[in-house]
Amino acid sequence: VQLQASGGGLVQAGGSLRLSCVVTGFTLDRPAIGWFRQAPGKEREGVSCLSTLNDITHYSDSVKGRFTVSRDAAKNTVYLQMDNLRPEDTAMYYCAADLGHSSSYYLCNSHPGNWGQGTLVTVSS
């Protein structure tokens, strides 16, 4: 099982970025998968999660209305579209999956067993 995240970078406040996570070793038709972030000095938080079983999404209050998680099952890829970015969105972003659960809410509020490497997002003011 591997998750490969990419797409981070430097963007000005108000701008947009799209992160991608290519997965191997499992298919996007049952498990929950999503995005977590960790800023310096802060705990890791689940910000956007998706159930690949029923397409139900869960977002943290801090990103609701600005971030959108989606998948392309044919490409085994999960995306995080981030719009109207703010300086407080600056963090290392990780994709993660829980192969034993399908709930997006559960994933975003748990400690998943499968992680990818992070991709850094920096939002300047």
Image (spheres, rainbow, N blue to C red):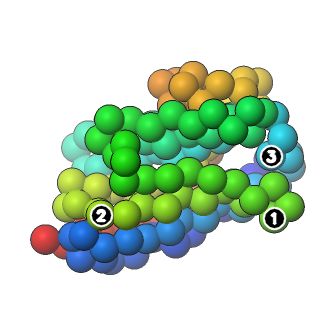
Check disc 2 and report the residue beneath it.
Answer: 84
Check disc 3 and report the residue beneath it.
Answer: 28
Check disc 1 and report the residue beneath it.
Answer: 75
Q: Which quadrant, please, contains the C terminus?
A: bottom left
Local secondary structure at mark 2: loop
Residue displayed at 49% across by 62% down: 81
Q: Position of residue 112 (x, y in %)?
A: 60, 31
Residue 45 in which image quadrant = top left
Q: Residues within 10 Å of mark 1 (few under 14, many from 20)?
A: few
Q: Amino acid at mark 2?
A: Asn
Q: Amino acid at mark 3?
A: Leu
Q: In the picture provided, is 28 more to the left or to the right than 64?
A: right
Disc on the earlier residue, 3 or 1: 3
Q: In the picture provided, is 46 more to the left or to the right than 103?
A: left
Q: Position of residue 58 (x, y in %)?
A: 51, 34
Residue closest to the eye, 62 or 2 = 62
Tags 3 and 1 touching, CB below 8 Å = no
